[in-house]
């Protein structure tokens, strides 16, 4: 099975995702990724990258090799990727089972850690990311998926 490619910071975004996004196609792609991550019946390999990933492919800011949302966007998202990868104690380019990454997130990431890990992210002020991390820490990954399906 070909691993799903996810940016370091997307490993956290998936837990707070509530259907907001950069475009309808991006939202739909994120819904697919999030559904897989939140499905406790599925376990599959994920390659963790600090680069464009499978979710980025549907983003309107997707460039040939980098995020093009704004002049400093790529540097910003790379910084978040690298901080999350270090915080989780994993290797850039490494392949991990989804269950291992969710377990590490639950053990190592507190909601307030996002103030540093995701500093200056436009989605952070909404509070959904911190709520998602709190849910993962409480073992409520699947419950959150059920809640989101009604939105």
Image: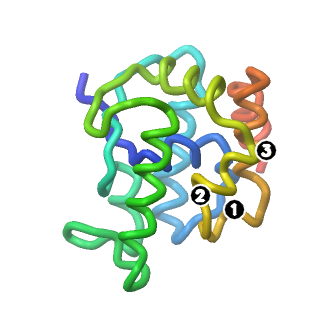
Q: Secondary structure at mark 3?
A: helix
The residue under label 2 is 118
Q: In the structure shown, which secondary structural element does the residue marked by tag 1 occupy?
A: helix
> Position of 72 compared to 27: left or right?
left
Instruction: Between residue 33 and residue 126, name the one nearer to us.
Output: 126
What's the distance in space between the residues labelled 1 and 3, CA to CA?
A: 10 Å
Q: Earlier in the sequence, mark 2 or mark 1?
A: 2
Please name the residue shown 59% across and 30% down the image.
105
The residue at 25%/22% (across/down) is: 1
- Left or right: residue 44 compared with residue 64: right
Q: Position of residue 30 (x, y in %)?
A: 51, 50
Residue position marked by numbered label 1 in the rendering:
124
**Quarter holding residue 63:** bottom left
Q: Which residue is mark 3?
A: 131
Residue under the image location 31 percent in, 57 percent down: 52
Residue contact at pointers 1 and 3, CB within 8 angstroms: no
Tell me if 75 is positioned left or right of 147 in this view.
Answer: left
| Viewer-nearest of discs 3 and 2 | 2
The answer to whether 34 appears left or right of 62 in the picture is right
**Residues tagged 2 and 1 counted as in contact (Cβ below 8 A):** yes
Residue lying at the far left of the rendered structure = 64
Image colouring: rainbow
Q: Position of residue 122 (x, y in %)?
A: 63, 71
Residue neighbourhood size for the residue with mark 1, other residues' Cα within 10 Å, grouped as few (<14), some (14–19), many (≥20):
some
Residue at 55% across, 47% down: 31
Mark positioned earlier in the residue sequence (3 or 2) = 2
Label 3, label 2: how far apart the Cα atoms are? 14 Å
64 vs 130, nearest the viewer: 130
How crowded pointer 3 is (Cα within 10 Å; few <14, some 14-19, many 20+) is rated as some
- Most extreme residue toward the bottom is 71
Label 2 to label 1, Cα distance in Å? 7 Å
First reached walking from the N terminus: tag 1 or tag 3: 1
């Amino acid at each position: 099975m070909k691993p799903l490619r996810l940016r370091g910071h997307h490993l956290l975004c998936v837990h707070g995702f509530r259907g907001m996004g950069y475009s309808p196609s991006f939202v739909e792609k994120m819904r697919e990724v999030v559904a897989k991550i939140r499905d406790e019946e599925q376990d599959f390999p994920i390659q963790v990258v600090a680069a464009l990933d499978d979710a980025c492919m549907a983003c309107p800011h997707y460039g040939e090799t980098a995020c093009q949302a704004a002049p400093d966007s790529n540097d910003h998202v790379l910084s978040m990727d690298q901080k999350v990868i270090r915080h989780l104690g994993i290797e850039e380019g490494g392949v991990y089972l989804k269950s291992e990454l969710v377990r590490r997130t639950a053990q190592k990431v507190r909601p307030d850690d996002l103030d540093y890990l995701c500093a200056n992210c436009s989605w952070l002020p909404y509070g959904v990311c911190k709520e998602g991390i709190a849910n993962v820490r409480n073992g409520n990954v699947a419950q959150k998926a059920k809640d989101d399906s009604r939105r």
